[in-house]
Image (cartoon, rainbow, N blue to C red):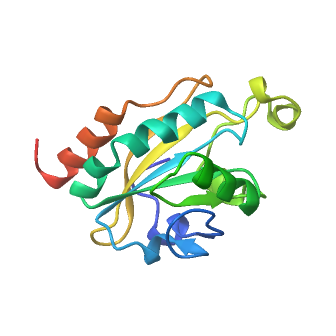
């Protein structure tokens, strides 16, 4: 996803199974940055590990006035189950029809066949959006395999660079 995508193209509103407004949109956030974690699905072990690790270091995102949003291609009930099971302190959004994930170009291996099996389906993606003026993408990590995700320190460094801390 290009950093010069229009603010209108970045806009979305999704059901939220976690803390925060329901439904939730980027304009609802009282934050300087949004970290969008596009997950593979409810059953993905790597996705579960990622959100738990982010939750453990969530105070570092808060200190940078950044909100983390986990986006699942699942129902709101599944999103709420994740939020409760892992005691997540950030929103868990349900993108059941994958319209937002598709608009943000979340990769899907093997096209339509990707919907048939988890190992060839959606790949993880992380996007950092600067919300201080008109929303704009400042960083994108496109996973090429189920475990291909940016480090938490890497995400925080991208925010620090945008803030001028580096």
Residue at 41% from the left image edge and 72% from the top image edge: 29
Question: Left of 40 or right of it: where is 51?
Answer: left
Residue at 38% from the left image edge and 41% from the top image edge: 56
**Front position in the image: 28 or 92:** 92
* Position in image of residue 53 (x %, y %): 43, 36
* Position in image of residue 43 (x %, y %): 73, 36
Residue at 69% from the left image edge and 58% from the top image edge: 95
Residue at 54% from the left image edge and 39% from the top image edge: 125
Whether residue 153 is situated above or below residue 55 in the rendered picture: above
Q: Quadrant of residue 139?
A: top left
* Position in image of residue 140 (x %, y %): 43, 42
Whether residue 102 is situated above or below residue 150 in the rendered picture: below
Number of labelled discs? 0
**Front position in the image: 17 or 154:** 17
Residue at the far left in the pictured view:
165
* Position in image of residue 152 (x %, y %): 35, 35
Whether residue 32 is situated above or below residue 48 in the rendered picture: below
**Front position in the image: 67 or 18:** 18
Q: Quadrant of residue 146?
A: top right
Task: Name the image quarter holding the C terminus.
Answer: top left
Whether residue 49 is situated above or below residue 79 in the rendered picture: above
């Amino acid at each position: 996803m290009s950093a010069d995508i229009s603010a209108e193209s970045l806009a979305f509103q999704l059901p939220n199974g976690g803390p925060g407004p329901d439904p939730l949109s980027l304009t609802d956030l009282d934050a300087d940055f949004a970290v969008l974690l596009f997950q593979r699905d409810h059953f993905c072990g790597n996705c579960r590990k990622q959100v738990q690790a982010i939750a453990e270091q969530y105070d570092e995102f808060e200190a940078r006035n950044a909100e983390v949003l986990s986006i699942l291609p699942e129902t709101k009930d599944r999103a709420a189950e994740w939020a409760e099971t892992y005691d997540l302190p950030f929103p868990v959004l349900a993108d059941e029809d994958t319209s937002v994930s598709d608009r943000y170009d979340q990769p899907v291996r093997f096209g339509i066949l990707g919907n048939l099996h988890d190992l060839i389906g959606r790949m993880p993606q992380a996007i950092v959006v600067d919300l201080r003026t008109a929303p704009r993408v400042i960083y994108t990590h496109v996973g090429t395999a189920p475990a291909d995700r940016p480090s938490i320190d890497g995400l925080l460094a991208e925010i620090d660079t945008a803030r001028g801390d580096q």
